[in-house]
Amino acid sequence: MYLEDQIVLITNPQEFTRLCNSIFTCVYGEEFQIIDGTQSDEGNDGYVRSEKRIFAIYCPIKPEKRTDTDYFGKIKSDMHKAASLRDQGKFIIERWTFITPRKLSTDLIAKMYKLGVDYGFIANHLESTYLANELYKNPHLFEAFPQFHSPRIDSKLDEILTYVKQSQKDAAVTDVPTHGTTFAESRAEEDSPDNKRVIELRTNIPTDKTKKELKTIYYKTQDDVAQLNALIGVLELFDLLEDDPLDMIELCKSGVTLTEKFGSDRFKAYFLAQKASFLSIIYINEDMRMYFSIMSSNLIGIPFVTEAQRQTTLNRLRHLQEEYNSNFNAALELTTKKKDILMLAGVLLLIGNAAGQRGLSYRNMKVADRYQYEKSLCKRSLLLAKDIYSEIKDEEGLANALHNLANQIRFFDEQDEALALTKESIELAKKINNKILMQKAIWLEETIISGVIPDYVHGEKRKPTE
């Protein structure tokens, strides 16, 4: 059930008022004045000084049998009270906002607007969609409202940490697979030429032709194992400037179908987590476009986005957020259920990197609370992945985790720490002779030291190290 649907089902008027007060305190800060509802509020359920706005919060007791006539009666009553407060000089009121759990009909909204004009107010209505969106922007509020079931990742990390600590004592999970993201199925026949070529392509430093050849093998091969490994290789070489995340999501769906054929939950988890990563990319790109459209509108005074378009985008963003969280959660549940701590670490890497990307975007958008939340999720996920690889003595995984952690924290103003992690990653990559990891770590080291990033937008690329 979507979060907005859960809000619609609130049965306690006091709980609905508490939710609204918590959200508006986050939205408006000190400008929002909470009114004591236990005494006569005179039609004032909250006041925003900077906007000269008064709130009228209304949550009918369920089961709800209210008609438009009943709602309009409430609107008239509360708006009349607001006008009295204004006329008595108690509050300066120019805007009147009606808040209910559910949406209202078009006719009722139109009548409310007209009544507002009669009283000299700019009237509007807020409901569950708005409230759900603000909750997602302020995820710390979920702690105060545990009745809302939102598929959030951070709440699972403590549970996963406990699981990992226990798994170290559990003999059933000491048999850790030695392969990471290369599918290996036991079969009588010799490995196919296609799969051998895929493994070769994925263990050498990629060239401009690598991804195209992997795609070709994925499309033409009759070997399901080769097809699965080629698909993983294509996803690993994702380039935001070259590849469409929507195309990658479709490839992830194909991967899930293939893994179900083999009965491989560990790789099903991998594809679900990859799918979530691409959904996260789409989410943050759309959020940033909306942000810059609003900023541009404010600067020049011409609206680039209508209110209807803004609401449509907010709904889509909320559903994207729910979808990427759900896929990440499904991947975590699969790996813990199967006691596959190696793939669990891989899923945590993807969660951490996605959170880091969102965190950087929110910092650029100056959304401080969300930036701090995503930064914390990023670090916790990547550190947990690093600890898992360390515990199971997977040096390749550890080198990769160190690289990913360094690549993220350099954007959190921790360049010195990132450089130290990168140097350690380079040494590990040398030790295990992993050319790809070594190349990525050396490039990252150069970037941290020089502060220079290639102009990828205009086709500039790094040259492989000899």
Image (cartoon, rainbow, N blue to C red):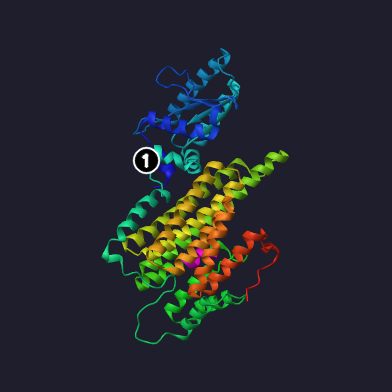
Q: How crowded is mark 1: few (under 14 residues within 10 Å), some or many (20 or more)?
A: few
Query: Percent position (x, y) of residue 301?
Result: 71, 38
Residue shown at 44%/37% (left/top)? 102
Q: Position of residue 132 (x, y in %)?
A: 47, 41
Q: Main structural element of the magenta stretch: helix, strand or loop?
A: helix
User: In the rendered view, would you say 137 is above or below 84?
Assistant: below
Q: In percent of the image, x 62 and y 75: which residue is there?
A: 208
Using residue 19 as the reference point, say whether residue 444 is left or right of it: right
Whether residue 282 is visible, yes or no, is no
Residue receiving disc 1: 146
**The magenta stretch spans which residues?**
247-252
Residue 338 position, x and y percent, is 32, 64
Q: Please name whichever residue, 33 or 30, is drawn nearer the observer in this view of the structure.
A: 30
Task: Residue 418: say if magenta.
Answer: no
Image height of 323 relative to 199, above or below: above
Image quadrant in which you'd find residue 263: bottom left
Q: How far from the left and from the top, in percent, is residue 426?
A: 54, 68
Observer-nearest residue: 448 or 353? Answer: 448
Q: Is mark 1 on a helix, strand or loop?
A: loop
Direction from residue 62 to residue 238 in the image, left or right = right
Image: 45 above or below 62: above
Image quarter where the C terminus lies is: bottom right
